[in-house]
Amino acid sequence: MHLRFRPAFAGLAADLQAALLPMLDAEDFAAFFTPDQVKMLCQQSGLDENALALALLPLAAACAITPISLFDVGAIARGNSGHWYFGANMEFIGTTMQQTVHAEQSAVTHAWLRGESGLATITVNYTPCGHCRQFMNELNSGTALRISLPNRPVTTLADYLPDAFGPRDLNITSLVMDNVDHGYRLTGDALTQMAIAAANRSHAPYSQAHSGIALQTASGTCYQGGYIENAAFNPSLPPLQAALILLNMHGENCQQITRAVLAENSEARLRQQPATAAALQALGCHQLDVVTLQKA
């Protein structure tokens, strides 16, 4: 079991511990559960799915990186496929506040990067802030997305974001979690191709500034992330943060990145390179290659 989970695991009920232990002890546990695992956990713990998700929140919060706030938030995105994905807030010393990641953003992006086609419920241990409410409105589930909190009835995003403004108000038809391919040609080495593939899935309907990134760590493992734009602009999530979410969910150290490749259009109205380079340098990575996207 990864060290970060041990304190939270110790506080769980004994029957839930017994059910979880084989999963958490697996070397390849990457902070998500399959539908069969969720079913097994419910059966062995005696909890229904909503109660189980709430009980698992301390494990999700254990993934938080909070050197600034010291305030850990955990979230679980429950996919239409039946998969459950952990998320946690992430903060980075030496960068701006805009580089931080909220727990709900983390869980949503984690699900998206694993190919989830839509979300049914977000379970979180604290009330979603306005930033996250707006961010979640970019999903194809819209305001019908269910929100589950401890000691409160399950409601929907519409209850948290009344009279919402979002992509549908701007006639955007391709939403986050929809299957898209922007058709950029895969070139270069394996890490470069990963970055371009991430750009092909990125969501940038307002600027058309598609972008993606791939990170390689000291372990030799590679992680990719795509840009997620938002109708309100500021809740947009840069590609670097998306990749860092996946890296963190795999239990790797964000300060062990040895190489990064950013793929974007040099003539786009927005550029990810300056902020990406600054954030990577704060994390100790000084090798950032930038490649220009080219249509196939």
Image (spheres, rainbow, N blue to C red):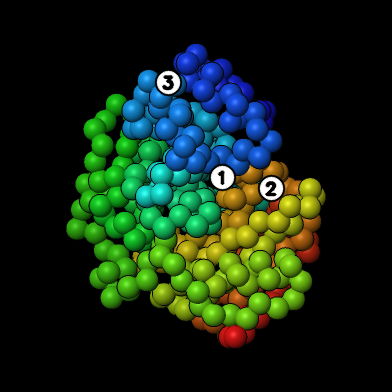
Label 1 residue SS: loop
Q: Residues within 10 Å of mark 1 (few under 14, many from 20)?
A: many
When the figure is inspected, residue 86 is found, relative to residue 13, above or below; the finding is below
Disc 1/disc 2 C-alpha distance (Å): 10 Å
Residue denoted by label 2? 254
Q: Position of residue 200 (x, y in %)?
A: 55, 73
Check whether the beta carbons of the residues at disc 1 and disc 2 lie within 8 A of each other.
yes
Q: Position of residue 174 (x, y in %)?
A: 37, 71
Label 3 residue SS: helix
Disc 3/disc 1 C-alpha distance (Å): 30 Å
Q: Quadrant of the N terminus?
A: top right
Residue denoted by label 1? 90
Closest to the observer, 38 or 55: 38
Determine the residue positioned at 79% across, 56% down. 258
Residue denoted by label 3? 45
Q: Position of residue 190 (x, y in %)?
A: 74, 67
- Mark sitting earlier along the chain (3/2): 3
